[in-house]
Image (cartoon, rainbow, N blue to C red):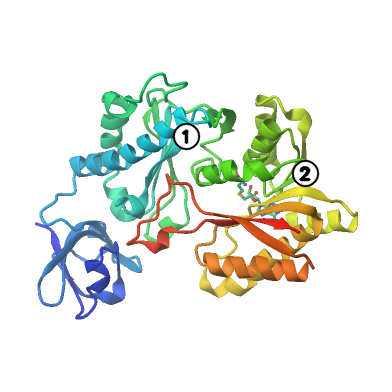
């Protein structure tokens, strides 16, 4: 028998539109679940004030988001077969994506996001695939308490029943190998808000190697799933690496390079010479290995420095580039620092405009969810004004299709980018 969460009068509308979050302020009371920590994470049935059933959700009194919906289908049980069904649906979509890419111009791909949390109707659950590895994150208490069932569902789909996931059309240049390891990377800040500690390690199979090689558009890239950002790599930028490629020619500055992915594309596929800039020496070490692996080590420089300072130095030295990629980390962490972060984005983009040759291209991103596409465009515009450049937008970018955004869940949109030509 599940606990019962009853909403305040008038608070049911978002839920009727299938928004998956219930804020604590919308809840009148919860019955049958002790609100002490012990029973947090339990599945509850959610009712409106008039007593009508709305959804089944994971409850957590310690979070501002006091409940996250597992299902809007009455009577659906939240068990291993539930997770298997949802993950399989997410996977089917990726499979169709992957198939078209494999048979298209871009060559093989064996790294992609399998499950994108709320936007794949699995709140708090991220699953990324890197060749024969799955890397998972459990971001919420509800997800954490179902960890074992989720791992079993993944094993069933990726290890035991390969035919479900690998019936790609032949000939397939390089189909993904069977999964040999499920690795957890739940070392994320959001877990604190859920009352959870960080957790990392092997959940199934053998210990992963230090670096795992993935294939993306025929390029070879190394991913450090233990220490890398997020689950190891910026899979969300994959389509943008493809879309930006025609503009990354000549002398390219890859600022906030991380492990160099944008730069490897430009060097290998366009013969560009790439300056990779990042504050992290260890990220650039891996970038160096990636350039070498793709045979373009001689086309690349690696500069460990703060981007704000280095771009100013380049400007003072009169240095110019044909194209610049700006892919900074998330500057806006809360509404409180929006203004400061906005200034940071503007400053960077202004410097980039000043470093571009005429007809040069700026490929610029923001991954701050609180900066929407409209605000981002305004920031880039004022950067152009301050940098005294006229420019035109040639492409608008978002997150890759394996990072879908639930229409019912606009919070799932965070990455936006512009490709801008300086005239
Ligand atoms: N473009 C990369 C991802 C960038 S992630 C890709 O496609 O894989 C953001 C990067 O910015 C991180 O590698 C981080 O080390 C770096 N970074 C953060 N602050 C920085 C700063 N002030 N100057 C230079 N690099 C910075």
On the image, the x and y values in percent for residue 306 come to: 74, 54
Q: Position of residue 3 (x, y in %)?
A: 14, 62
Disc number lying in front (1 or 2): 1
Across and down, in percent, residue 83 comes to 24, 43
Q: Which mark is residue 111?
A: 1
Classify 62 as above or below 101: below
- Taking depth in this image into account, of 247 and 188 the one nearest to the observer is 247
Q: Position of residue 205 (x, y in %)?
A: 37, 26
Whether residue 128 is visible? yes
Query: Gap in Å between the C-alphas at discs 1 and 2?
Result: 27 Å
| Front-lying residue, 88 or 187 | 88
Rendered residue at 27%/41% (across/down): 89
Determine which residue is flagged by label 2: 303
Instruction: Judge: label 2 CB < 8 Å from ligand 1.
Output: no
Task: Give the residue furthest to the bottom.
Answer: 9
Q: Is residue 352 left or right of residue 101?
A: right
- How crowded is the residue under tag 2: few (<14 C-alpha within 10 Å), some, or many (20+)? some
Q: Residue at x 66, y 32 (%)?
A: 269
Quick one: quadrant of the N terminus?
bottom left
Q: Specify the quadrant of the image occupied by residue 379.
A: bottom right
Q: Secondary structure at mark 1?
A: strand
Q: Quadrant of residue 45?
A: bottom left
């Amino acid at each position: 028998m599940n606990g019962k969460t009853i909403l305040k009068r008038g608070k049911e509308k978002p839920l009727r539109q299938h928004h998956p979050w219930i804020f604590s302020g919308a809840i009148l009371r919860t019955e049958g679940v002790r609100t002490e920590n012990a029973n947090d994470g339990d599945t509850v049935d959610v009712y409106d004030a008039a007593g009508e059933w709305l959804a089944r959700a994971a409850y957590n009194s310690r979070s501002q988001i006091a409940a996250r919906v597992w299902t809007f289908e009455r009577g659906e049980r939240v068990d291993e077969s539930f997770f298997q069904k949802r993950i399989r649906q997410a996977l089917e979509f990726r499979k169709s994506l992957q198939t078209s890419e494999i048979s298209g111009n871009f060559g093989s791909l064996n790294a992609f996001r399998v499950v994108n949390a709320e936007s794949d109707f699995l709140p708090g659950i991220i699953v990324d695939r890197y060749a024969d590895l799955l890397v998972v994150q459990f971001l919420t208490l509800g997800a954490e308490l179902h960890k074992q069932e989720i791992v079993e569902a993944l094993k069933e789909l990726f290890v035991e029943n390969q035919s479900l996931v690998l019936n790609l059309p032949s000939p397939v240049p390089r189909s993904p190998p069977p999964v040999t390891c499920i690795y957890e990377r739940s070392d994320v800040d959001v877990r604190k808000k859920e009352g959870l500690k960080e957790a990392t390690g092997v959940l199934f199979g053998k210990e992963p190697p230090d670096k795992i090689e993935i294939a993306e558009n025929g390029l070879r890239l190394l991913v450090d799933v233990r220490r890398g950002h997020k689950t190891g790599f910026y899979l969300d930028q994959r389509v943008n690496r493809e879309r930006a490629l025609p503009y990354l020619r000549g002398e390219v500055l890859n600022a906030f390079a991380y492990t160099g992915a944008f730069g490897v594309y430009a060097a290998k596929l366009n013969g560009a010479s790439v300056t990779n800039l990042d504050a992290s020496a260890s990220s650039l070490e891996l970038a160096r290995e990636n350039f070498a692996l793709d045979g373009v080590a001689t086309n690349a420089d690696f500069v460990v420095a703060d981007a704000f300072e280095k771009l100013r130095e380049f400007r003072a030295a009169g240095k110019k580039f044909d194209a610049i990629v700006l892919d900074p980390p998330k500057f806006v962490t809360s509404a409180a620092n929006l203004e400061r972060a906005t200034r940071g984005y503007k400053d960077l983009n202004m410097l980039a405009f000043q470093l571009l040759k005429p007809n040069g291209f700026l490929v610029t991103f923001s991954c701050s969810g609180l900066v929407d596409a409209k605000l981002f465009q305004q920031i880039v515009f004022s950067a152009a004004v301050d940098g005294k450049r006229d420019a035109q937008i040639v492409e608008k970018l978002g997150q890759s299709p394996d990072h879908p955004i639930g229409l019912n869940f606009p919070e799932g949109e965070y990455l936006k980018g512009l490709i801008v030509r300086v005239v």
